[in-house]
């Protein structure tokens, strides 16, 4: 089976100068893969480009085996890729039910009832405006909205932004369960490095627009503290001569 996401030497950015260079990553069916890295590393730029929202400068993108390098976002979405953007992408003045109905396209074989099976909490909130939900509930709605399009692969950009760590610890395993149950691929951008690696199969670490490390999640977990420290530019301890 083809990878669900496959980029090859992808370079992209907002003008003619690339911000992301030579990005070669893949996500297989049923796989949870995290894309880690400090602020400004190019994670959101990469996801937006894969989703077709930003032009490519060079390289290729394939989704579910089909080249989508020059495709518009709606074509990439129809190919089976769903993006939950930074900031959740909800209609805050509309109700939970309305948000879900808006995200569901005609070809989708997934109904609202099936998606709510993953997030029972939302069942009692169907008539509440999305803007009045808690942060965790909003994120579940964003995930439910992505799933209702019946995607083969979803990309989650900083799902846990602004959420209490205890909520993050609850949401991430849900992502793992959904990937397992549906055989869906997940590309996860996450600042909670250790929590993300705990549910992931593999990971990539980006810095300054390039992949600087990659490997099985279990291996990267051993370096999780170092990765997190590098986010803050706080490398003094690790770099200091004589440091353990
Ligand atoms: N619309 C834009 N126009 C020009 N440059 C941009 C634009 N959006 C982002 N950038 C720049 O591109 C670089 C990568 O940004 P990006 O948002 O991809 O980083 P990120 O890894 O997602 O960071 P964060 O963890 O803070 O979300 C940054 O230097 C940023 O300033
Ligand atoms: Mg970002």
Image (spheres, rainbow, N blue to C red):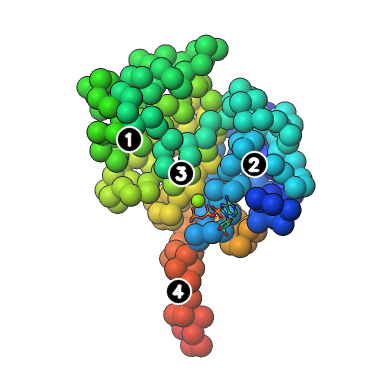
Q: Residue at x 53, y 25 (%)?
A: 151
Report which quarter residue 26 is drawn in. Answer: top right
Q: Earlier in the sequence, mark 4 or mark 2?
A: 2
In this view, the residue farthest toward the bottom is: 241
Report which quarter residue 212 is drawn in. Answer: bottom right
Give the Cα separation between the discs numbered 4 and 3: 25 Å
Q: Secondary structure at mark 3?
A: loop
Give the Cα separation between the discs numbered 4 and 1: 32 Å
Residue corresponding to mark 3: 86
Q: Earlier in the sequence, mark 4 or mark 1?
A: 1
Q: Residue at x 27, y 20 (%)?
A: 126
Q: Earlier in the sequence, mark 4 or mark 3?
A: 3
Q: Pinpoint residue 146: horizontal percent, then vertical percent.
A: 46, 28
Residue toward you, 25 or 137: 137
Q: Secondary structure at mark 2?
A: loop
Residue toward you, 231 or 101: 101
Q: Earlier in the sequence, mark 3 or mark 2?
A: 2
Establish if 175 lies above or below 191: above
Q: Residue at x 43, y 35 (%)?
A: 89
Give yes or no for contact between labels 4 and 3 (Cβ–Cβ under 8 Å).
no
Q: Earlier in the sequence, mark 1 or mark 2?
A: 2
Residue corresponding to mark 1: 138
Residue corresponding to mark 2: 54
Q: Pinpoint residue 175: horizontal percent, then vertical percent.
A: 42, 36
Q: Secondary structure at mark 1?
A: helix
């Amino acid at each position: 089976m083809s990878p669900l996401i496959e980029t090859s030497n992808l370079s992209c950015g907002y003008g003619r100068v690339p911000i992301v260079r030579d990005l070669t990553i893949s996500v297989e069916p049923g796989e949870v893969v995290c894309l880690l890295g400090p602020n400004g590393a190019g994670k959101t730029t990469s996801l937006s480009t894969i989703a077709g929202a930003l032009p490519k400068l060079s390289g290729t993108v394939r989704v579910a085996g089909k080249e989508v390098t020059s495709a518009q976002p709606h074509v990439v979405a129809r190919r089976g890729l769903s993006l939950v953007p930074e900031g959740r992408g909800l209609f805050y003045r509309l109700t939970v039910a309305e948000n879900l109905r808006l995200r569901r396209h005609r070809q989708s074989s997934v109904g609202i009832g099936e998606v709510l099976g993953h997030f029972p909490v939302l069942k009692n909130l169907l008539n509440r405006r999305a803007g009045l939900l808690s942060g965790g509930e909003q994120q579940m709605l964003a995930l439910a909205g992505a799933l209702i399009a019946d995607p083969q692969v979803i990309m989650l950009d900083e799902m846990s932004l602004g959420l209490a760590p205890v909520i993050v610890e609850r949401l991430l395993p849900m992502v793992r369960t959904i990937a397992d149950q549906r055989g869906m691929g997940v590309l996860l951008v996450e600042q909670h490095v250790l929590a993300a690696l705990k549910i992931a199969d593999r990971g990539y670490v980006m810095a300054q627009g390039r992949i600087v490390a990659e490997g099985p999640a279990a291996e990267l977990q051993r370096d999780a503290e170092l990765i997190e420290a590098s986010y803050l530019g706080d490398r003094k301890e690790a770099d200091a001569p004589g440091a353990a």
